């Protein structure tokens, strides 16, 4: 386990050395990894850091409002409304790896634009060790590693938590004094809800996934999963009222893990599963059925794409 206090001291010194007297932008997502990277960079270079949150239209419910509140102490916080650009870029894209690369390139272009405005030469991001392992091992490209375009208009990309596992990042977050809502927050994929939609990430499917994820997170909170969410995996026939419907199928996934490299499907109580399906099908008229995923990692990955 990482010595959080020593790590913070070394990471701050490393950021100071890499960025030197230049400006930098930090890619914020609301998760613990980018939040820790932001806190470290802010300690290192202060007001020369511009935090940038890109609302891709693929984020969790209420994420933009949460970002505004959590990072209000950084006066230079920028929120970029980019929903249309991301969803338009994903139109017609069905291959999981291609989706990740499209999102990775779009992210970089957004940060390049904001960096130019802020006269920043460096990009700071919250890449962690499992991101690198899975990207380099051809398991899946992470948008901030294997999903990056070949040409990037930055003097350097700074990754202060690149050698840490998720549980170690949480230790650093606690040592930094970040609020529990951030330090203990459930992981969320960098490409967002696009990888919780099998096939093309249309606006309709993304909206269904967003609401389903919100329900699953709420209903599983007492069971303390490593990660829990709903994914839109296709369509099926159902009955609502007296009418036949051909609606979306939502797969619910809830897993236990230490570092995300392996995971076990959680044995949720039947009553919990029934509340989840009742809420998801009842709150969205376009959902026909809900199924529960009992597959461990391996052979499955945690996310669907």
Image (tube, helix red, strand yellow):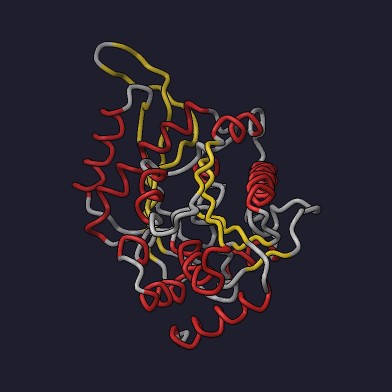
Residue sitting farthest toward the right? 151
Which of 255/144 is in front? 144
In the displayed structure image, the side of residue 274 where residue 135 appears, left or right: right
Label total for image: 0
Which of 124/131 is in front? 124
- Which of the 4 image quarters holds residue 210? top left
Identify whether 200 is placed above or below 138: above
- The residue that appears at 26% across and 11% down in the rendered structure is 242
Residue sitting farthest toward the left? 271
- The residue that appears at 56% across and 62% down in the rendered structure is 49
In the displayed structure image, the side of residue 19 where residue 8 appears, left or right: left
Residue sitting farthest toward the top? 242
- The residue that appears at 76% across and 54% down in the rendered structure is 152
Which of 127/40 is in front? 40
- The residue that appears at 32% across and 26% down in the rendered structure is 284
Dividing the image into 4 quarters, which one contains the N terminus?
A: bottom left
Which of 6/99 is in front? 6
Identify whether 237 is placed above or below 60: above
In the displayed structure image, the side of residue 82 where residue 286 appears, left or right: left
Location of residue 119 in the rendering, given as x and y in whole percent from the top left corner: 68, 54
Location of residue 22 in the rendering, given as x and y in whole percent from the top left corner: 68, 66
Location of residue 120 in the rendering, given as x and y in whole percent from the top left corner: 67, 57
Identify whether 180 is placed above or below 195: below
Location of residue 226 in the rendering, given as x and y in whole percent from the top left corner: 38, 62
């Amino acid at each position: 386990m990482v010595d959080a206090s020593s790590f913070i001291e070394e990471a701050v010194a490393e950021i100071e050395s890499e960025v030197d007297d230049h400006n930098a932008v930090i890619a914020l997502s609301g998760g613990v990894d980018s939040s820790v990277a932001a806190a470290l960079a802010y300690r290192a270079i202060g007001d020369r850091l511009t935090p940038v949150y890109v609302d891709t239209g693929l984020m969790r419910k209420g994420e933009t409002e949460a970002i505004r509140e959590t990072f209000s102490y950084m006066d230079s916080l920028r929120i970029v409304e980019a929903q249309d650009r991301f969803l338009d870029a994903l139109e017609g894209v069905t291959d999981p790896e291609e989706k990740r690369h499209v999102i990775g390139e779009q992210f970089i272009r957004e940060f390049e634009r904001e960096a130019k405005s802020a006269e920043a030469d460096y990009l700071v991001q919250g890449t962690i060790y499992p991101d690198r392992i899975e990207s380099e091992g051809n398991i899946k490209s992470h948008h901030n590693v294997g999903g990056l375009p070949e040409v990037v208009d930055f003097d350097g990309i700074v990754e202060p938590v690149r050698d840490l596992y998720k549980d170690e990042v949480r230790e650093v977050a606690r040592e930094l004094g970040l609020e529990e809502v951030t330090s203990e927050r459930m992981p969320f994929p960098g490409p967002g809800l696009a990888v919780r939609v099998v096939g093309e990430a249309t606006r309709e499917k993304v909206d269904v996934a967003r609401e389903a994820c919100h329900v699953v997170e709420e209903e599983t909170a007492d069971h303390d999963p490593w990660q829990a969410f709903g994914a839109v995996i296709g369509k099926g026939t159902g009955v609502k009222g007296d009418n036949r419907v051909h609606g979306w199928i939502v797969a619910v996934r809830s897993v236990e893990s230490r570092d995300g490299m392996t995971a076990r499907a959680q044995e949720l109580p039947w009553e919990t599963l029934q509340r989840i399906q009742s809420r998801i099908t009842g709150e969205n008229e376009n959902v026909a059925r809900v199924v529960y995923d009992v597959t461990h990692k391996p052979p499955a990955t945690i996310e669907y794409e």
